[in-house]
Image (spheres, grey):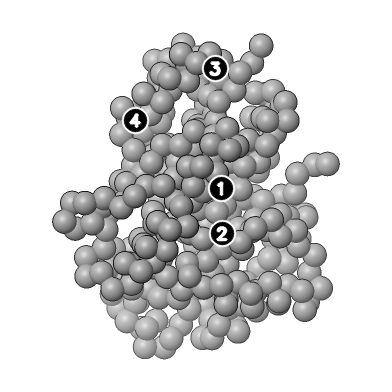
Amino acid sequence: MEKIAIVTDNACDASDAELAEMGVECVHLSVTRSDGTQFPSDNTPENIEAYYDYIPDCEVLPTTASPSPLAFAKLYSRLVDEGYTHIISLHISSAMSGTVDVARIAAKDFPVQIETVDTKCNTVGQDMFVRRIAQLRNAGSSFDELMAEREFITGKTSIVFMLDTLRNLVKGGRTGKAVGLAASLLNIKPLLTVDPSGEVDMFGKAKSIKRAVDKLTDYYVKLQDMFGPLECCFLHTRNLTGVNALRESFIERGIPFDEVDVRQVGPVITTHVSVGCFGFAYIPKANA
């Protein structure tokens, strides 16, 4: 009889307690200050809010790092000892982190089937991906059925958001300083998504929050045309005003949407995008 474990990492931005309630194990990427001290790795609301207080004014950005092979090996070993016959390990896009590669290295020598999965997404999109697989596992789906769902939702589950400032991307070397300066002077708000390959892609820009909301709404309509009915989770880094404006835009335009939650983006991703972001994550609606 199959006994299936599910593993993810804290780039999904759910707290350890939330994941445990679903029966999901978690390994942790680290976020380290310039003095070598680490931020708490559990995505509790208190820890996320403390990070939002810290990140806008820090002179040297914290660094993020993948979990070690030993962290994965210890977890996989415990799960094998507990009698699990299959392990599904769902991780942040390999275009953004080496986490899934580390998981694959650690998984090589175990006597059970360990499926290491590049979700091609991150933060709340990754959370929605993990929740879908966990919900189906908890409802009795087989390993093969879970792998079929993984194939179906990969590339169709992601995030779309407005970046309020390019400061952290520039400081982290992820875009040119000239680009950051130009965007700052023009007050341009980049509109970003994580594409089906797991790469960050700028699909537009706006000179005001209102125009950003309009374009994010247009993008949601485009996604529904491509993938059919979606589950939607609004997301932000301390910008509920933006979330509320986006929700109102959906309603005013009569767009059908199944809102499942509003969630905060945690420290791993906030290190690169800073505060002020807002947008949505999406996943195709589950079959009834």
Q: Amino acid at mark 1?
A: Asp
Amino acid type assigned to the residue bearing label 3 in the image = Tyr
Q: Position of residue 23 (x, y in %)?
A: 57, 32
Side (left or right) of 56 relative to 254: left
Q: Position of residue 59 (x, y in %)?
A: 22, 70
**Mark 1 residue element:** helix
Query: Which labelled disc corresponds to residue 263?
Result: 2
Q: Are the two marked residues, 4 and 2, in contact with CB atoms closer than 8 angstroms?
A: no
Are dots 2 and 1 in contact, CB under 8 Å?
yes
Q: Earlier in the sequence, mark 3 or mark 4?
A: 4
Which one is nearer the viewer's eye here, 137 or 166?
A: 137
Assess whether mark 1 and mark 4 are in contact (beta carbons under 8 angstroms): no
Q: Earlier in the sequence, mark 2 or mark 1?
A: 1
Mark 2–mark 3 CB contact (< 8 Å): no
**Residue 76 seen in this snapshot:** yes
Labelled disc at residue 127: 1
What residue did someone put label 4 on?
71
Question: Could you tell me how far apart the alpha carbons at marks 2 and 1 are, in whole angstroms?
Answer: 10 Å
- Separation of residues labelled 3 and 1 (CA atoms): 22 Å
Q: CA distance from mark 4 to mark 2?
A: 27 Å
